[in-house]
Image (spheres, rainbow, N blue to C red):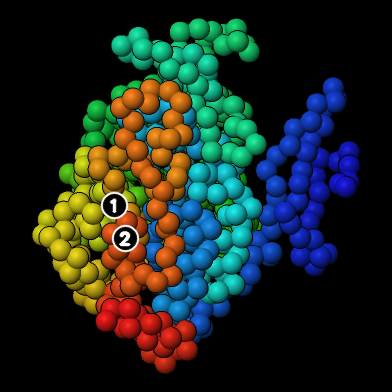
């Protein structure tokens, strides 16, 4: 039912009544056909009108965002009515792009959580739902007055060896086959140079990093380099983090392809991103990526767009944030670079730093910038696995599923996030305009799977004897009062909601909140 054309371009516009998604395919001279991702148009996404109006949310520049770790898209959609009544500004989806999946265990787990952070392409078909489910969730949440945000994995692609090559051997000479992906209808081709002992059956050449579904080729990646120094800019930028094949983000085509991916995320309805592993993309490259994205947007950032960059400080805070002359600085150096590329002061403020120094050493997260450019939170998903982050909260915060002495201790830290966060410079109303609440799940024993049903060992086909299963749990539970035993749902706790609403100065008499409050009080009793 489509229309064919010889021209390589076509213009769509809202004024012409065009709407998406638009299916696109390209036919070669030899008759071959390549289909690309459907095109979504931003004007199809419903306008966001929170229950109390958008002024208190400053058009998307101030508010609390709930991070839904391990929640399928359909469940987030179901939860958005609660978020709207509670007054949360948005919902953050964990990685939504095509990602590694397998029928074989990896370190005894079937499809562990960190496979979400190993992209095979930028097609919107992650394990939490396909593109149609994602669009339905985003649009449904927006209709209720809740914005959506994406966890964007831009530093790397898959882990070495987690690819479509048919034959691999590990360092102990044990055989393992190809990996699958989360994409419905068949995975995108993906190849790495790692653990492969045969030339490619397609090219006859030694394998290298190739991701035709993006597309990326061998020269779009840094040469393999162990990341063994956290103070060496070259290692930070070009090292293969945990063996993940590292993109050469210095290249203009890579920067533009990432910007195009961000454009796709915005077009389907997302209002912003968390940039994963941002400190492994050098500041100049981040400046170039956002500049290219801004060009795609017509020369200015959308007024409700925000990004927060994951820059784990550790012992490198001086280099990363406080010394603009360090040669690798995400503080005033990055801000000045954005300004030099034409970003207004307001646009620079939209590109924020996730302050990993909060709550113990919050000053390290702003140093040479204003805390208006900070996003803060208590516990985060990375801290739930030992050794996966260098963030140190000391006695000023705790991780609910790991080291909190009690639910009440965790609740107090979450309430403090809104009532009296550490490190305020100007005022609690102005500083830290983005505050995040993690809604996660408890581990099932030592397993590191996700309880969406896809880490259940009953699905295992290879190396299953030692498989540590993660059985299905429902993420959405409309009767939850918060702080549950499987999925945690602290965002439903009334004390936390009240603290958040006070910070936002939301009207206590809003109809949705009045009903929610009565229900929550009855639930608690």
Within 10 Å of the Cα at label 2, are there few (<14), some (14-19), or many (20+) other Cα atoms? some
Residue 99 or residue 340, whichever sits in front: 99
Proximity of marks 2 and 1: CB atoms separated by less than 8 Å: yes
Q: Is residue 437 above or below residue 290?
A: below
Residue drawn at (68%, 65%) of the image: 43
Q: Residue 491 is drawn in which quadrant? A: bottom left
Q: Residue 284 is drawn in which quadrant? A: top left
User: Is residue 316 visible to us here?
Assistant: no
Residue 482 or residue 224, whichever sits in front: 482
- Tell me the tag on residue 190: none
User: Is residue 9 visible to us here?
Assistant: yes
Q: Earlier in the sequence, mark 2 or mark 1?
A: 1
Residue drawn at (38%, 90%) of the image: 508
Q: Does residue 292 appear left or right of residue 226 in this picture?
A: right
Task: Give residue 3's position: percent from left, percent from top.
Answer: 88, 46
Residue drawn at (15%, 63%) of the image: 406
Task: Give residue 258's position: percent from left, percent from top.
Answer: 54, 42
Residue drawn at (30%, 27%) of the image: 466
Q: Is residue 193 above or below residue 431?
A: above
Task: Give residue 307's position: percent from left, percent from top.
Answer: 44, 57
**Residue at numbered disc 2:** 488
Within 10 Å of the Cα at label 1, are there few (<14), some (14-19), or many (20+) other Cα atoms? some
Residue 374 or residue 514, whichever sits in front: 514
Task: Give residue 525's position: percent from left, percent from top.
Answer: 27, 81
What secondary structure is marked by label 1?
loop
**Residue at numbered disc 1:** 442
What secondary structure is marked by label 2?
loop
Q: Does residue 60 appear left or right of residue 406 in this picture?
A: right
Q: Please identify the residue farthest to the bottom as the structure is shown.
A: 509
**Disc 2 to disc 1, C-alpha distance:** 7 Å
């Amino acid at each position: 039912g489509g229309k064919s054309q010889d021209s390589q371009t076509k213009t769509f516009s809202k004024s012409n009544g065009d709407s998406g998604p638009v299916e696109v395919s390209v036919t070669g001279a030899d008759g071959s056909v390549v289909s690309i991702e459907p095109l979504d148009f931003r004007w199809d996404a419903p306008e966001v009108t929170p229950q109390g109006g958008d002024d208190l949310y400053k058009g998307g520049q101030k508010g609390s965002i709930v991070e839904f770790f391990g929640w399928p898209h359909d469940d987030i959609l179901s939860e958005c009515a609660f978020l709207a009544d509670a007054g949360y500004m948005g919902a953050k989806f964990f990685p939504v792009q095509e990602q590694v999946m397998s029928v074989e265990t990896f370190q005894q787990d079937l499809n562990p959580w960190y496979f979400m952070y190993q992209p095979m392409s930028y097609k919107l078909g992650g394990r939490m739902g396909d593109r149609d489910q994602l669009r339905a969730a985003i649009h449904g949440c927006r209709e209720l007055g809740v914005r959506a945000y994406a966890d964007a994995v831009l530093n790397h692609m898959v882990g070495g060896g987690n690819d479509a090559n048919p034959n691999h051997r590990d360092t102990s000479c044990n055989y393992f086959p190809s990996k699958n992906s989360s994409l419905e209808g068949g995975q995108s081709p993906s190849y790495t140079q790692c653990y492969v002992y045969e030339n490619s059956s397609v090219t006859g050449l030694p394998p290298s990093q190739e991701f035709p579904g993006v597309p990326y080729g061998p020269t779009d990646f840094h040469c393999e380099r162990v990341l063994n120094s956290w103070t060496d800019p070259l290692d930070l930028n070009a090292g293969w983090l945990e063996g993940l094949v590292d993109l050469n983000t210095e290249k203009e085509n890579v920067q533009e392809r990432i910007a195009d991916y961000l454009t796709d995320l915005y077009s389907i309805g997302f209002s912003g991103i968390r940039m994963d592993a941002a400190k492994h993309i050098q500041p100049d490259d981040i400046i170039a990526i956002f500049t290219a994205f801004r060009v795609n947007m017509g020369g200015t950032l959308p007024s409700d767009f925000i990004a927060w960059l994951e820059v784990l400080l550790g012992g490198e805070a001086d280099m990363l944030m406080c010394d603009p002359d360090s040669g690798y600085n995400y503080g005033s150096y990055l801000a000045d670079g954005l300004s030099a590329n034409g970003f207004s002061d307001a646009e620079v403020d939209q590109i924020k730093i996730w302050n990993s120094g909060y709550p113990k050493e919050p000053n390290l997260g702003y140093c040479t910038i204003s805390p208006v450019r900070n996003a803060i939170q208590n516990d985060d998903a990375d801290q739930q696995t030992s050794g996966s982050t260098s963030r140190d909260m000391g006695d000023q915060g705790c991780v609910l599923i790991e080291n909190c002495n009690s639910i009440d201790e965790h609740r107090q830290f979450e309430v403090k996030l809104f009532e009296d966060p550490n490190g305020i410079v100007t005022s609690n109303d102005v500083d830290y305009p983005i505050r995040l609440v993690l809604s996660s799940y408890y581990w099932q024993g030592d397993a590191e799977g996700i309880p969406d049903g896809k880490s259940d060992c009953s699905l295992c086909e290879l190396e299953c004897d030692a498989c540590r299963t993660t059985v299905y749990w429902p993420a959405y539970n409309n009767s939850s009062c918060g702080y549950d035993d499987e999925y945690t749902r602290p965002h439903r706790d009334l004390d936390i909601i009240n603290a958040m609403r006070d910070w936002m100065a939301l009207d206590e008499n809003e109809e949705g909140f009045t009903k929610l409050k009565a229900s929550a009080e009855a639930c608690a009793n």
